[in-house]
Amino acid sequence: MHEPEQPAATPETTTPPPRDPNDERNWSMFCHLAAFAGLIIPAGNIIGPLVIWMMKRDEYAGVNLHGKEAVNFNITAFIIILICSLTFWLVIPLLILGAYAIFWLIVTIIAAIKARDGEAYRYPMTIRFVK
């Protein structure tokens, strides 16, 4: 007699390793801290957060939220710095530039801390280019 063929063995489905709950918060924090690349690389304050956001936005909802905020804020900062730099011969833009540099540093650190604590953060005085 002919024995019925048995179905081919299927490979076991493997489950991905469990995610570390801190990964999302760490990547969210890195979105904000990557803006410090702008202190070394021209436009690095935009490129750094943009790269991290693009890499991890589909993987973590928090990174998507914090990445958009960091990119929007740093595009706004870049525009303000550019305007102040182009009008450098006037005294007021230089004062604004100095004050804005301190503001940028403080709110970037605050945003990174909030992201690390798992809290949402909206930068003040930011044009929302990326929705």
Image: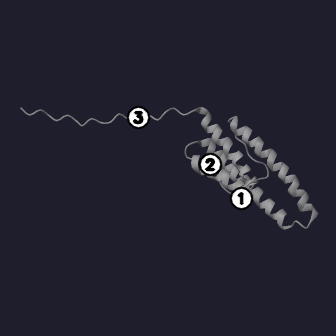
User: Mark 2: which amino acid?
Assistant: Ile
Sequence-first tag of 2 and 3: 3
Q: Residue at x 59, y 32 (%)?
A: 21
Judging by the rendered image, the residue that carries numbered circle 3 is 14
Q: Could you tell me which secondary element the residue under label 3 belongs to?
A: loop
Badge 3: residue crowd in 10 Å (few <14, some 14–19, many ≥20): few
State the mark number for residue 52. 2
Indicate which disc, 2 or 1, sits on the residue closer to the N terminus. Answer: 1
Dividing the picture into quadrants, the one containing residue 42 is: bottom right
Quadrant holding the N terminus:
top left
> Which x, y percent locates residue 93?
89, 61
Q: Hey, what amino acid is under mark 3?
A: Thr
User: Badge 2, how many Cα within 10 Å: few under 14, some, many 20+?
Assistant: some
Q: Is residue 83 left or right of residue 20?
A: right
Question: Is residue 7 visible to the viewer in this orientation of the structure?
Answer: yes
Q: Residue at x 65, y 38 (%)?
A: 26
Q: Is residue 99 above or below residue 112?
A: below
Residue 43 circle label? 1
Residue type pointed to by label 1: Ala
Name the outermost residue toward the front: 40
Please name which of the two marks, 3 or 1, marks the residue nearer to the observer.
1
Which mark is drawn over residue 94? none
**Residue found at the far left of this picture:** 1
Q: Position of residue 123 (x, y in %)?
A: 76, 47
